[in-house]
Image (spheres, rainbow, N blue to C red):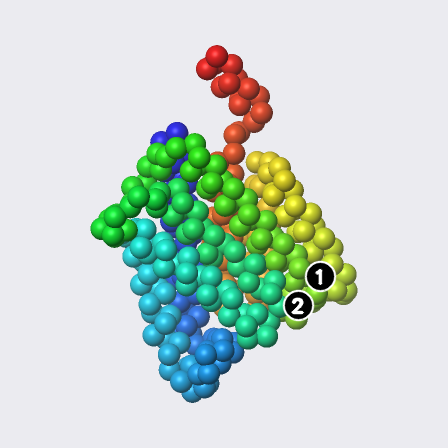
Amino acid sequence: MIQSANKLHYTLRFVSAMCFIGHGAFGIITKQIWCNYFAVFGIDQATAFHLMPWLGTVDILMGISLLLYPTRAILLWLVIWGTLTALLRPLSGENFAETIERAGNYGAPLTLLILTGISGKTFKDWFNKISPNILTDEKTLVAGATCLRVVVFLLLTGHGWLNLVEKKGLMGQYTALGFSNPAQVAHIVGIFELAAAAMVLIKPLRPVLIALLIWKMGTELFYPKWEIFEWIERGGSYGSILALWFMLPRTSAQTSKKSLSTQ
């Protein structure tokens, strides 16, 4: 149990840091599309370009702090900030699928926050370093597993939805990969991801989760520009799938054997 707890802790902690380090890198690079998100608050383009590196630096520092000295306060901030930045996309005119496709950004730190325990904590507890040994009650473990299932469901549903509506960026990826009919490819991928999302929500299976992990880690490398930062930023997607894999029993036979041994 302690070994599994350590794996869960370090997986969710590392990938949550990846999200914000990758996101911060785009702030320092001054990604053009960020201007649309600043515009939601009435901030003009010139000011947006001035603020981007500052916000990007804060994101990177938060990610590094999670690696070096993880606290519940940092995790809570990452959940709030990850949710806000995801919501800015539909608020700026993009498809709502963009928000749920980024569920890993706010879902990974949220799951770790749930597993480390938040009820009954004093103000000081929120700033104490959290232990990698997630030794908690069954109810909390179930809540963490449920959170992960919903997160993986959302990120797969969001990406599948974007394929079905033929998002321009995805069409460009499929064209660059040599597909003559990118729209058809997008529809096939979209249906596959929606079916996978439903399976994860209803009955996740370890072999399927490994296949989905490989799928996500591979397909997120297809961005035509700054692909390494795009891949890093989506660490929450891979980490949520992997963490859910850790939380599931290895086989039904092993589960039955364990049940018999306790009788």
- The picture places residue 112, in percent across and down from the top left corner, at 40, 46
Q: Which of the two residues, 74 or 177, is positioned nearer the viewer here?
A: 74
Q: Which of the two residues, 41 or 1, is positioned nearer the viewer here?
A: 41
The answer to whether residue 165 is seen in the rendering is: yes
Q: Amino acid at mark 2?
A: Lys
- Label for residue 164? 1
**Given the current orientation, which residue lies at the most extreme left position?**
124
Q: Amino acid at mark 1?
A: Leu
Residue 110 vertical position relative to residue 45 in the rendered view, above or below: above
- The picture places residue 89, in percent across and down from the top left corner, at 54, 70
- Label for residue 167? 2
Answer left or right for 166 relative to 240. right
Instruction: State the residue at coordinates (29%, 57%).
Output: 65
Q: Residues within 10 Å of mark 1 (few under 14, many from 20)?
A: some
Quadrant location, the N terminus? top left
Instruction: State the residue at coordinates (46%, 65%).
Output: 84
Q: Which of the two residues, 78 or 162, is positioned nearer the viewer here?
A: 78
Numbered-mark total:
2
Q: Secondary structure at mark 2?
A: loop
Pointer 1 with pointer 2, Cβ within 8 A: no
Q: Which of the two residues, 130 or 180, is positioned nearer the viewer here?
A: 130
The answer to whether residue 214 is seen in the rendering is: no
